[in-house]
Image (cartoon, rainbow, N blue to C red):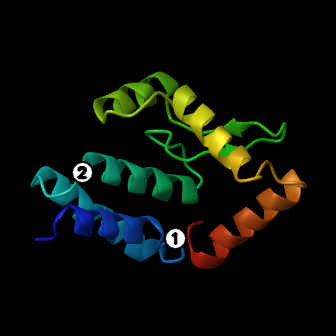
Amino acid sequence: MANEDGADAAAILAQHSIGKPDLQKKFLVHLKSAVVDGEALPVHAACLEDRILSNQGQPQKYGMLFGWNEKGELVTNVDDFRLANERRQKLGLPSIEEAKDLHRKEIEGMGGGPPSDYHEHKRKELAWAKRVGWR
């Protein structure tokens, strides 16, 4: 019913409703159905699915989200690196390696970088995930 801009806006809302796990999971069910009906882009469903998996502490399917490891490197947690890259290719996305390089450059261009205290960052991340009901 919505045009492409409306579909993009809905996908953005779904992506950023991270504080409402049940709502975000409902969005994913509807979004996957809309993809099947040709009313939504598969990449939007892939992004949302990976965000949900990541928030639950599970490996992603597409490697859409990156985070910092203890060494200050950008990484993504995927179920199977080769399969994730195959899934990305089917969506017309660059490989995980290419996406990681682009994301790192974007972060650096904005003056960002790894957290100054990795362990504190991870502690806060887990506390948030528990507080809002992801874990």
Helix, strand, or loop for circle 2? loop
Mark 2: few/some/many CA within 10 Å (<14, 14-19, 20+): some
Residue 76: image x %, image y %?
Answer: 60, 39
Q: Comparing marks 2 and 1, which lies closer to the viewer?
A: 2
Q: Check disc 1 and report the residue beneath it.
A: 18
Which quarter of the rendering shows the C terminus?
A: bottom right
Write the residue at 36% across / 48% down.
46
Q: Which of marks 2 and 1 is nearer the N terminus?
A: 1
Q: The N terminus lies in which quarter of the figure?
A: bottom left
Q: Who's the residue at 56% across and 27% down the image? A: 97
Q: Mark 2 points at which residue?
A: 41
Q: 18 left or right of 108?
A: left
Q: In this view, does 118 lie above or below 81?
A: below
In the rendered image, the residue lying farthest to the right is 117
Q: Which residue lies furthest to the front in this view?
A: 109
User: Contact, CB < 8 Å: mark 2 with mark 1?
Assistant: no
Residue at x 86%, y 61% (from the top left corner): 120
Q: Quadrant of residue 75?
A: top right
For numbered disc 1, what is the local secondary structure? loop
Q: What residue type is labelled 1?
A: Ile
**Percent of width and height locating residue 42:** 26, 47
Q: Residue furthest top?
A: 82
Query: Type of residue at label 2?
Result: Leu
- Does any portion of residue 56 appear in the rendered image? no
Q: Which of 133 and 13 is in front in this view?
A: 13
**For mark 1, does the 10 Å Cα neighbourhood hold few (<14), some (14 to 19), or many (20 or more) residues?**
some
Residues at marks 2 and 1, CA–CA distance in whole angstroms = 20 Å
Between residues 108 and 11, which one lies in front from this camera angle?
Answer: 108
Instruction: Residue 103 in the image: state x and y as whole percent.
Output: 60, 42
Q: Nearer the viewer, residue 57 or 102?
A: 102
